[in-house]
Amino acid sequence: MEAALLFPTRVLFSEPWEIRFVIGASTSILILAVALLRLNRLRPAAVYDPQRAWLRAAIYFLFCFLVSWAAGVLPVLRSIPIVRPDQIGAPLWWGATTGLAAIILFGYGVIWRGGTASHGRRLSLAPLLVFGILWGFATGELLLSIWSIIEKAGFGPVASAVGTFLIGGSLNGLWHSKYWDIRVSPDHNVLECNRTKILLAHFPNLIFSLMHLVQFSNPYVFVLGQVIALTISTLVMRFPPFWGPASAMVPQHPPEGRPRAELDALINQAP
C-alpha cells in the first residue's frame, strides 16, 4: 500500500521551498560547469588538480540532491526526525544501530585505511570534513533514490534493498573506476588491497545499512552511515583542499592504484 512506502509518491513543487531549491541547484551547476570548462581550456587534460576535482565533485553533489528531490527522498528527510520517538527506548534499535556503526568504523577506519596511500599529502581538516559530509549525504541520498524508484514500481522493502545493492553498487563501482577515482579523488588506491576494501568495507557497509533500513525504516541512519564512511575516506586519502598546492597537480593516476612495492619504493626515494 502507498502508506507503507518509505518514500511516498508526491506532487513535485507542492511546497514553496522546492522551486527555490531546484532553481538554486540548477543555476549553481551551470556556474560550476562554466568554471570547470574554463579551467579545462587553460590546463592540460591529463593532469589532476584540486580546483577541477572540487568543481567536478560539487556538480556531482548537486546532481545527487536534485535526483533525491525528484525521487521524493529529500522531502522525506526534511520532514522526519533522525530517530523516531518509539526507537529511543528500544534496545533492539540501539543494538542494531551500534553494530552498524561499528561495522562502518572498522571497515573504513581499519580495512579501507590499511589499503589506502596518502602520498604525503597534508591533512586540511576543516575543508575535508565539509567535503566528506557533502559526499556522504549526496551518495546516501542517491542510493535512497534508487530504493524509492524501486518501491514506487510496486516492490516491497526486501526487493528494494536487493535492487539498491545490485544497481547502486554496480553503478557506483563503474562511476568510481571510470571517472571519480581518476578525475576527482587523488591517487590513493593500493592495487593489491582493492578487492579486500570492496569485500570488507564497501559491501558490509551497504549490506548492513540496507538491512537496517529494511528492519527499522530509518533513512537518516542510512544516510549518516554513508557520511561516516565517506568522511573517513576523505580524511584517510588526504583529499587536497580546493586551494591545493601546485605539488598536487600531478599526471593523471590509474583508478586501480599502484602496487604496494612501487609505493614503498617511492617512500624510500623521498628526501
Image (cartoon, rainbow, N blue to C red):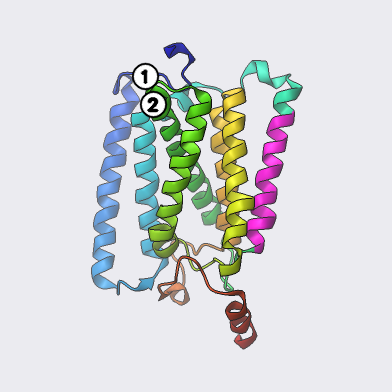
Query: Which residue does the numbered mark 2 point to in the structure image?
Result: 72
* Residue under the image location 43 percent in, 24 percent down: 151
**Which quadrant is home to the C terminus?**
bottom right
Q: Nearer the viewer, residue 2 or 49?
A: 2
- Cα separation, mark 1 vs mark 2, equals 7 Å
* Residue under the image location 59 percent in, 36 percent down: 209
Q: Nearer the viewer, residue 114 or 24?
A: 114
**Amino acid, disc 2:** Gly
Question: Is residue 22 rendered to the left or right of residue 106?
Answer: left
Instruction: Report if residue 132 lies within the magenta region.
Output: no
Quarter occupied by residue 117: bottom right
- Circle 1: element type: loop
| Label pair 1/2, CB-CB below 8 angstroms | yes
**Which quadrant is home to the N terminus?**
top left
Report the magenta residues as a range. Answer: 95-114
* Residue under the image location 27 percent in, 54 percent down: 33
Q: Is 60 located above or below residue 125 in the figure? A: above
Query: Which residue does the numbered mark 1 point to in the structure image?
Result: 9
Q: Position of residue 48 (x, y in %)?
A: 40, 70
